[in-house]
Amino acid sequence: MKEIRIAKQGVIALISLLSFGTTEAQEQIATQSDTIHLTLDQAIRIALDQNPTVVVDSMEVLRTNYAKKETLGNLYPQLSFTGSLQYAIKKQTMSMAGRSFEVGSAFTTSVGFNAGLPLINVPLWKSIKLTEESINAKRETARQTKINMVSTITEAYYQLLNAKDSYKVLQSSWNTAKENLRITRVRFNNGLCSEYDTIQADVQVKSIEPSMIATKRGIELATLNLKIQMGLPDEYPITIDGTLADYERTMFDEIKLSDLDTTLSDNPTMRQLDVTERLLEKQLEVTKAQWYPTLSLSAMYNWISMGDKLTGNDWNPYSTVGLSLNFPLFQGGSRYYKQKQAELQYKEMQFTKEDTKRKLKLGLQNSLNNLRVAIETINTTKAAAESAWKGLVIAKKRYEVGSGTTLELTTSQNALTNAQLNYLQAIYDYIVAKNNVDEVLGNAYNQYIQ
């Protein structure tokens, strides 16, 4: 419980920083002791802040940047300090003119500095370009993760909103059915209707209750799903406000199908494939660079001491400067076949890229078709809900004056409930279709992924 309380305080602070700038709003957040009310924007930003996958991707970008700096470090001079101590257990013996004598010293001590600098190293230069593309690849991976996360949170958020609105519709229908049952019982007691009408009204009430129970369970599951996607504990109390109808009032102004950029230039998958293609191209260049010679500069400045005693000997300095040329001539064909592998990988990526683009365009077209169907369905279901509402009002009036039947009233109420539920589902289907389009296009969530 302590961990949940600490996490809750952290999220409250995060929400306060994200969306509220005034003292009054901050005080409002501080007074929420039980349940936190979240907007879609807050839910998305908390998910991007709390989700481990997003955090790991950001760390991978930083790690690859360090790898680039590590490679760049090989361009700079390398300086090292060395020291050695040798003791001759048996000195070398030389023979001359029939006489033998030992040469050398018992102790040989050497200390000094060694330095090296690569002058020409094509593989190293190409490796630096390779690490730069590796950073771009990690950035695209992080971008794609964020886009997927925003899309997932958006769908989970509106799924919960759809469940809550559906429950309100069923609860309203249940309350109306309860009122009709009360009126029918009064009419039955006054001898104005039959017992069958009372039974039918009671059945209408009881038939709605299972749907309410199932929808309430759906609200709990949708809430749990949203919390999991946000990276919050299961026990953490959250809720969302508003209705799908609020979204419907403005959603047609948010998108114009004719203005959409369908070139997939910002699609996260295509952008990642573009970077991967460039990465393989750089890898091929590194492989080809293995055929080039390397030239390096080396220098050393050492002090050496030789004598039969460990201490007390003279230290004599000496220094050298040199060039080292390495021209690889034959390595058993390993470079040749390694280059062939890199060339095939590069060509494979080009085919994969074209095939992926065709599939993405097909998926985008399907999502756009779903979007058009959802727009038409919203208009149809909205008109049907308005007509069903008028029909229920007329049925109630007819029933109150005795010219209508319970069956007519029940039928009108069921028609209104189904029309309202269909209307909510149509709005949700539109949101899902639009979210799929935004995810494919990859340019709708820039405020979250920059």
Image (cartoon, rainbow, N blue to C red):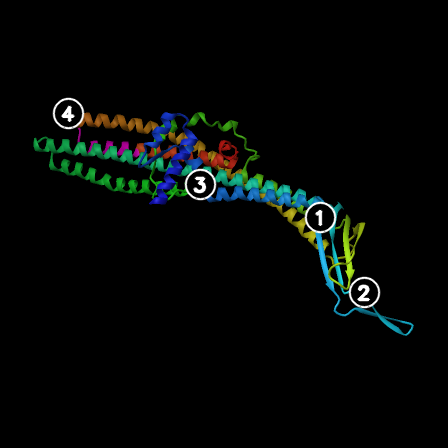
Nearest to N terminus: mark 3 or mark 4: 3
Q: CA distance from mark 3 to mark 1?
A: 44 Å
Q: CA distance from mark 2 to mark 4?
A: 130 Å
Looking at the rendered structure, the secondary structure element under dot 3 is: helix
Looking at the rendered structure, the secondary structure element under dot 4 is: loop
Main SS type for the magenta part? helix
What residue span does the magenta drawing correspond to? 404-418
Q: Residue at x 56, y 42 (%)?
A: 62
Residue 238 or 262: which is nearer the viewer?
Answer: 238
Q: CA distance from mark 3 to mark 4?
A: 60 Å
Q: CA distance from mark 3 to mark 2?
A: 70 Å
Q: Which residue is mark 1?
A: 79
Q: Which residue is mark 2?
A: 104
Q: Which residue is mark 4?
A: 401
Look at the image and say whether residue 414 sits in the magenta stretch. Answer: yes
x, y percent for residue 84: 72, 58
Nearest to N terminus: mark 1 or mark 2: 1
Residue 234 or 347: which is nearer the viewer?
Answer: 234
Q: CA distance from mark 1 to mark 4?
A: 103 Å
Q: Amino acid at mark 2?
A: Gly
Answer yes or no: do the residues labelled 1 and 4 have beta carbons within 8 Å? no
Residue 231 or 193: which is nearer the viewer?
Answer: 231
- Based on the displayed image, in which of its 4 quarters is residue 126 positioned? top right
Image quarter of the N terminus: top left
